Amino acid sequence: MSVKPIPEGYHSITPYLGIQKAAEAIEFYKKAFGAVEVMRLAMPDGGIGHAELRIGDCPIMLGTPCDQGPLSNPDQSPSVGLHLYVNDVDASYKQAIAAGGIVVSEVKDQFYGDRSGTLKDPYGHLWFLATRKEDLTQEQIEQRAQEMFQQG
């Protein structure tokens, strides 16, 4: 039996978040996004050495940053955001805000065919929640973008 280079159920890219309060964040992700905890390696000091969750059909990894690792908790201005497609963005956004998410931009229809909103989780990570409303061609998106920028 050969070992698969990409494990079953994983995609080529999997987000890995450094979160100082990783155990607390796991509970937030469960409430906010319906995450399912797959595994957790708890450290003697109460931190999380490594944890894996599933949100929809995608894995996400996280752990408590430590001196030996390259990750740290995001500062005021994260450089990465997680884009999450959901069936009902309005309901999912409300659920995430009720769980403790912080509004960055309210849900609205976007020129590129999605209805989306942005929130920051209590640990500093940005989440873009969206539902596809229209399938558009590249040309249609470019035309709408041009019209939007002309309006100011």
Image (cartoon, rainbow, N blue to C red):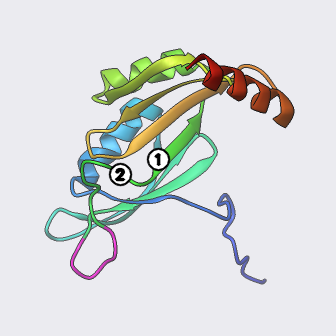
Q: Is residue 57 magenta?
A: no
* Residue at the disc numbered 1: 81
* Residue 24 percent coordinates (x, y): 24, 46
**Residue range corresponding to the magenta coloring:** 66-71
Q: Tell me which corner region of the image, top left, top right, bottom left or bottom right, holds residue 112.
A: top right
Q: Spatial distance from mark 1 to mark 2, Cα to Cα?
A: 7 Å
Tell me what residue is drawn at x 67 percent, y 60 percent.
11
Work out whether 39 lies above or below 139. below
Tell me what residue is drawn at x 45 percent, y 39 percent.
127
The chief SS type of the magenta part is: loop
Work out whether 26 lies above or below 151. below
Q: Is residue 122 left or right of residue 12?
A: left
Amino acid under disc 2: Pro
Q: Is residue 40 left or right of residue 72?
A: right
Q: What's the mark number on residue 78?
A: 2
Which is nearer the eye, 141 or 47?
141
> Are the two marked residues, 1 and 2, in contact with CB atoms closer than 8 angstroms?
yes
